Structure formats: structure tokens, C-alpha cells
Amino acid sequence: MSKSKLRWLLERDQTLPLYRQIEQQLRQRISNGEWPVGTRLPSQRKLAEQLGVNRSTVTQAIDELASWGIIAGNKGGGTRVVNNTWNRLAANTINWDRYVESGAHQPNLPAIRQINEAEYRADIIRTGTGEPGPELLPTARIRHILADASDEPFLGYEEPKGNLRLRQQIVHYVAKQGIQCSPESILIVSGALQALQLIAIGLLQRPSSIVAEAPSYIQSVRVFQSAGIGVHRVAMDAQGIKMSHLRQQLTEHQPGLLYTIPTFHNPTGTIMSNERRAELLELSSSLSLPLIEDDVYRELWLDEEPPPPLKSQDRHGNILYLGSLSKMMSPGIRVGWIIAPVPVIDRLADIKMQTDYGSSGLSQYVATRWLADGHQAQHQAWLREQLQARRDRLLAALEYHFGDIGAWNVPAGGFYIWLRLPVTVHVHRLFKLALRERILIHPGYMYDRAAAHHIRLSYSYAEMGQLEHSIQRLRQLVKQCMDV
């Protein structure tokens, strides 16, 4: 059963005891089918944490349900629902756990599920979240666009490739980065993650594989693995992909494509050097190896403008280019794009129509106005100043609190600092200890199993005073883990 936060209201000023209120609400979810027979209940400790009560209170409620034969526990198997009525054993009910466990899409790693749930707790300090914080979002500009939208016909479905006006604006936008394309070679998607999903199911045979940098964002989502596509690791250094290792992996595995984030890499912040970019393009051309260039962080440069996109040098149609407004304008708008050869875009547009019948017309209208009215250029200049100041404050906090026990990169853009901890630190234990103190970290093993002594820090989301306090407390927790 999902361990998501229980959104139940306990009336603490009622005469009805808390354990009885909990029992009634548990029983209601069982009797109405939300928790069918066979469902495993959260642990008593977890229930107590989520409901904000003592564990003994939860124990009373559980014991009451057990006495009625509604739930039962067994050694090693936890407590499960065994009956959904008060007078009849439910012998022929559907075992939904079997269906859930049989689904084709792989579940997230446990740490990622915990992060996804904890991020929406009001008391949590989010030290690794990869999106702009609320105070960095252009709320007033978006409100103005929406207020001026009364006569726009955006409430119907859009055409398969997306709103034509938006695609035309993207043509002009990416031309400033050296990318030449037409609206026909652009597909509007609901964020870059959907672009990866479409590519995984629409362009690759099964069984097959891809190669990707290690560590990599792509290892923290199960897009390709769930589509039956293997993901092979390619080592990195300060200049980006190690070309010798890439050639070795290509020889051994003959993958279908390469996924790369060459500019402000997630999670390391690395910028691929011009020399490596040229080598990679030459290799792609000589081997006819398609590349996915994930370029969603490009406009977040802080010190100097990064090298041009790989796509700007693509004369053979080898690169599938991913862009997005999520990191700059709004993650909630969910507007991104793929730029690729027209036959590829036609194929992916057809699949997208089969899955969601097109991205939100309202979101596409907002994105069109955002680009057409010049908001992107104005906002990104301001946002860079804010992110640069935040980065420098986080670097100063790290130098003060981790200078003797850690190492890290100095990112020239993007959101992230890749912090390496002593090898004696068990990051899984650190994650749990920090979460108990309402500090949410992103452990490195989410991005690569070999990065077990790293954490990804972000200076884009948390309020800076809270983030600095978290760094101070994290040092204490790291030292505590080192002493074990």
C-alpha cells in the first residue's frame, strides 16, 4: 500500500478518544474499498508520525480492529487487511497487491518515493530540490498573461505537434542559441521527462539499451528501464564524458542512443568542454549514434555563457534536442519541447496523441505569450543574479562547515552542488537522520550506485537562511554517522 501522508483530520477537542477516531477512519477506508483485503498497512511507527500521535494511541486502534478480525499481523509480513465487513469473511475479493506488483512500470527507488512525499510537508527544508523556489517564480508576470487571455481560444485540443504559434516562438528562441529548425520539427511535450518517455517507447527496439553519463538524472527515473531498455554507465571527469570509456561501452553493448546533459549537468553541474563536444559529435556522425541532448539548464548560466548546444552543430539530424521552461518560468506550467528530424517528430507526436491527446492548451498559451512578449529575457537576467547570490552563500556555508570533511564543485550555472562526503559516511543513514530533523537531502546513490558518498545540494529552492542552517546541522549529522 502507498505510504503517502494520511490526510485525515483528528479532532483533538472532541470527547471521542483519539484512538477511537483513528480506528473509525481506518475502518472507513477498509469498508469502502480504498484499502481492500490484502492491503498492507503502514507500520505503527509510520502511522503515529503521519497522524501526529503517540504510538500507543495507534496501537490501541490497531488492536481494536484486530479484535474484530478486520486486520491481522504475521511475522515478517506486517499487518494486512483480512476482512472488509464485520460479519463476513471476504474470501473472493480481488488481490490488488498482485496487480500492483505486476505492473510494467518499475517503482521509484524507496528514497525517491520518500522525497516525493516529504517535499510537500510544510515543515521540511528542501536542500536538494531542482526547481526555483516560490519567491523566484514570475508570479506577477504569469498573472498578467492570464488576465489578458479572455479572448484566446485555448480551451480546446491543440494540434498533434502542439500550438503552432508556440512552435514558431521556439524557432526564434533557439535560433539565438545557434539551432536552425522549423515548426514542423518541434513537438511540444509536458516537460522534458515526457519527451524521454516518448523516445523510450517510440524509437527503441526491445531488447536494446542506451548509454548515459554516470552519475545521471536518467538513473533517478525509471523511464527507459520500465520500457525494457537497459541503461549503461559512462564515466565522467571535469570535462564531461570520458570518450575512451564511451567508446568501450559502445563496442561492448552497441546501444541505441546516448543520453547526455552537456551543459550544467544534473547532478554534478559539469559543463562539457568544447573539445569533448567536438569529439562526441564526430563519434556520433561516424557511428550513426543518435544523441539525446537534455539542455533544460542552459539559460541558468551564472558566470559566463556556456558553449553552444550540440544541436547547433548538428548537420545530419543525429541529435534529439530537449528544452523546457520548467527551470526558468514555471515547473507547474509543464511545457517543454523536442527538436528532431521531422519523421521522428511525426512518430512521437502520434504516440503523444495516443497517450494524452496533447499538452494543455492553457499552458501552451501562457508559454507562447511568455516568449512572444519578451518575458523570458527579462526574467532570466534577474533570476541569474538571484541564483548567483544564492550559490555564493551556499559555497561559503560549505567552506565553513565542510571544508575539512568534504569536497565539491563550484558550478558555473544550473542549480546544483555535488558534495562528496568521507567514505566512512553511510549516506542512507544520513538521509534518515536528516529527514527526522525535517531536512530533506538528495543522496547520490539515486543518480549512480557508485556515488554512495555524495549528496546533491540545490541553491534554487529553500530559503537561504534555512539552507545555511541545514548545512550547519548536516555537518553534525555527518560527524555522527562517521562515529558509528
Image: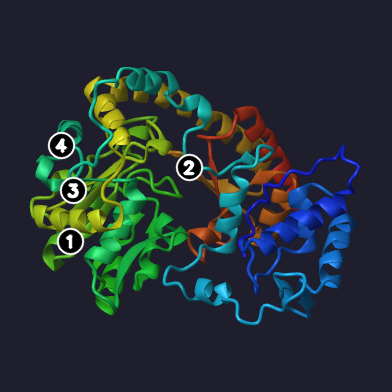
Q: Which mark is residue 160?
A: 3
Locate the C terminus by quadrant.
bottom right
4 or 1: mark nearer the eye: 4
Could you tell me the amino acid type at mark 2? Gly
- Tell which circle, 2 or 3, labels the residue nearer the N-terminal end: 2
**Residue 435, can we see it?**
yes
Query: Which of these two is toward me, 12 or 30?
Result: 30
Q: Which residue is mark 2?
A: 130
Q: Which residue is mark 4?
A: 164
How far is mark 1 from mark 2, CA to CA? Answer: 30 Å
Query: Considering the numbered disc 3 on the image, is that residue within a helix, a strand or a loop?
Result: loop
Q: Which residue is mark 1?
A: 284
338 on left or right of 133? left
Locate the N terminus by quadrant.
bottom right
Query: Considering the numbered disc 1 on the image, is that residue within a helix, a strand or a loop?
Result: helix
Indicate the position of residue 41 as horizontal and vertical percent values.
71, 66
Query: Considering the numbered disc 2 on the image, is that residue within a helix, a strand or a loop?
Result: loop
444 on left or right of 327? right
Instruction: Answer few, some or many: residues within 10 Å of disc 1's Cα (few below 14, many 20 plus, some between 14 and 19).
Output: some
